[in-house]
Amino acid sequence: MDTARDLAHGDPWRDSLERSLARRRERASRSVPAPAPAPESAPESVRTPRRAATTRRRPPRTPRPPARRQRAGNLWATLQVWGERARARIPGVGPRGVGGIALLAAIVASSLAGGGAGGAPSAARADAAQSAFVTRPSGAQLTPAGAAASRTRVCPQTVATAGYANPLAGAAVKPERVDQGVDYAGSGTLVAIGAGKVTYLGTTNTGWPGAFIEFQLLSGADAGCYVYYAEGVVPAAGLAVGQTLLAGQPVATIIPKYPSGIELGWGSGRGTKAFAKVAGQWSPTDDQDNVASAAGQSFSALIAALGGPPGKVEG
């Protein structure tokens, strides 16, 4: 081969271009190295780009009320049911009484839900408490006499004999009229109807024509009720206020042929006033007309159930 001839006839410009392009390709290959292939033993998650992975979205959760609010709602519903049942079963509970129960429920529910003690105004809480326990016509004012009557309602005045004794078992008496209580004439000993505690004992300045003895029953169907023996009676020896009595225990002795006789009945626990007087069942007009009070008739029925003679309804 004639080498000198080949060099003489070559294209210097093309050779230079090819050398330049070769250098550029070499520099590009050095600046961006090729990624190394993953080992065959590597897991698929390593060899697969993250962008290729698919993501699963969870369905949105339904928000649930906080536990305290849920308890408050349950309490509100329960007290509403109680209020309606009380209104249906107890004649003395009217719409205002049910409203008071509902308002109390709202206060408790507000506290449980996070409202705290300040969840309702003080006036509203006071009105709720009053409405829940003192039932009266809407818009009516509770007079002192009415307030006293409401306090005496704790006495059920039930005609039941279990645990009780005939108060006239040790006496010979003649029944007379039923007024605030039951009037009798006769002689003998008066005994306690049931277990009780002496709350009043007076022989002068009682407001009655004679003595006044009162005790509160501690057991039986009428536990909490007060019983009085008044007028022509002498307290049993050693009897004192605060003393505990047993059913059938002597309480007083009847004064024979006493002008006004004796009277037995439901007391009020307020000095020497009978239940009928405090509850508004008795007045001077009723006395003149011989009108029998509801409390007097109740006590007469109890004596009859215990084996004693009932009083006479004259008016």
Image (cartoon, grey):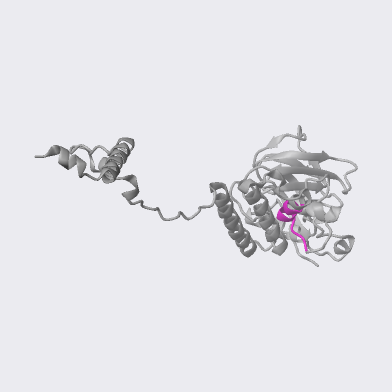
**Residue 36 in picture, x, y percent from top left:** 25, 37
Is 131 magenta? The answer is: yes
- The residue at 61%/47% (across/down) is 112
Residue closer to the observer: 174 or 269: 269
Q: Quadrant of the C terminus?
A: bottom right
Q: Find the magenta span and give its range.
A: 127-137
Name the image quarter holding residue 211. Answer: top right
Residue closer to the observer: 4 or 97: 4
Q: State left or right for residue 206 relative to residue 313.
A: right
Does 226 appear above or below 282?
above
**Residue 178 in picture, x, y percent from top left:** 77, 60
Is 156 magenta? The answer is: no
Name the image quarter holding residue 277. Answer: bottom right
Does 148 appear above or below 243?
below
Which residue is farthest right?
205
Q: State left or right for residue 116 relative to residue 73.
A: right
Q: State left or right for residue 80 relative to residue 265.
A: left
Which residue is farthest top?
238
Q: State left or right for residue 214 relative to residue 79.
A: right
Q: Quadrant of the N terminus?
A: top left
- The residue at 73%/40% (across/down) is 251
